[in-house]
Amino acid sequence: MCNRICLAVFLFLTACDFAQAQEKYRVYLGTYTGKESKGIYQCELNLKDGSLSTATLAGETSSPSFVAFHPNRKYLYAVNEGDAKVSAFAIDDKNGNLTFLNSQPSQGGAPCHLVVDPTGRNVLAANYGGGSCICIPIEADGKLGKASSFQQHVGKRKNGHSIHVDKANKFALCCDLGLDKVIIYAFDAAKGTLSPHGAFDTPKGSGPRHFAWHPDGKTAYINGESNLTIIACDYDTDKGVLTQKQVLSTLPKDVKRKGGSTAETVVHPSGKFVYVSNRDPYNSIAIFSIAPQTRKLTAVGHQGMGVKTPRNFAIEPTGQYMLVANQSGGNVIVFRINQSTGELIPTKSSVQVPRPVCVRFMEIR
């Protein structure tokens, strides 16, 4: 009897803990540092009403313009764009604060994007200045070892802007804005090596910046920073090959383009929608629906209320809310997502953060 009661109590408490974990997410915010900003900030998103708590400094570091978590959620990694470094931090489970562990040089100028491979063995980063990408091994204690692989892009204008690992962890794909290419590398997670495999040529003048996978792992969406487009591609998971199938503008049909650029691409967790941020002077999030069978896109609309230089945005794991980092607006705002249409519904929720440029979510355990 005692064993049954104990088991029942254990299951009840476990269920309560799970429910509580789903009520809130910790939000980490990368910034460009200066007089007001000091590093990586954190706040909490309440899933019940979409409200955000006051942001506090989680860890002081120089211009952490992009951050990524280790799969075990014990460590956070950040590019230090101005210092040409990649830094490692330990995450305090109780309060979310970050403790600096160490850093390694990115071996290129202005590292602006990074990911941790699914095995948790490596950090892969893209260098904007000079166009290159690097693989840095992660040690048992979360610290970064010396670089295990470095690849220099070749061409007149080279600007590595993001790097992404496919679902099978076999290939790493690096968007080079200057070359109008997505450069593809065979990736060996155990050895931490990147080996040239091929390249996908985006339309001339598109300036591929960021890249998002559909949950099926067989479709990719790339935003063209320079010509404000989204490029839909099929992806051969065995061969590591991208094939273009569709290019759409991220601007409304009645808008005549005068400058501007896109920044981020995000696919909804359901795989039903994809979003792209348009920066100044358009200041909006473009919304596209994804066809269930073909994965082709249809423009749904735009949301610009409260949006000001949306450098980065992200959708929390349950798919209910989108948080947009307004780089020049000095805040992060919240939209509720219509689960049927993908449209973004403004909320009154926001949090003040100096020069926010990256949004990432973590479960509160």
Image (cartoon, grey):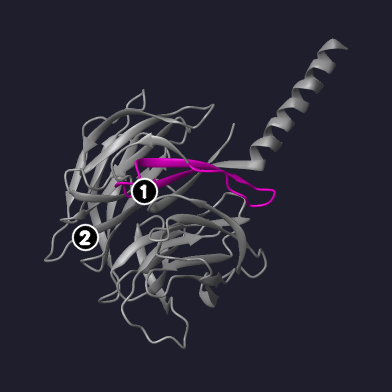
Residue drawn 78% across the image and 27% down it: 12
> Crowdedness of circle 1 by 10 Å Cα count: few (<14), some, many (20+)?
many
Q: Is residue 50 magenta?
A: yes
Quarter of the N terminus within the rendering: top right
Of callouts 2 and 1, the N-terminal one? 1
Q: Label 1: which residue?
A: 31
Q: Label 2: which residue?
A: 159
Q: Position of residue 238 (x, y in %)?
A: 39, 55
Quarter of the C terminus within the rendering: top right
Q: Position of residue 356 (x, y in %)?
A: 40, 52
Indicate left or right for 73 with 2 as reference: left
Res. 69 image quadrant: top left
Give the total number of marks visible in the rendering.
2
The boundaries of the magenta stretch are 27-55
Residue 51 or 106: which is nearer the viewer?
51
Residue 96 or 73: which is nearer the viewer?
96
> Compared to 103, does 291 lie above or below?
below
Residue drawn 25% across the image and 29% down it: 145
Residue drawn 62% across the image and 50% down it: 51
Q: Position of residue 236 (x, y in %)?
A: 40, 61
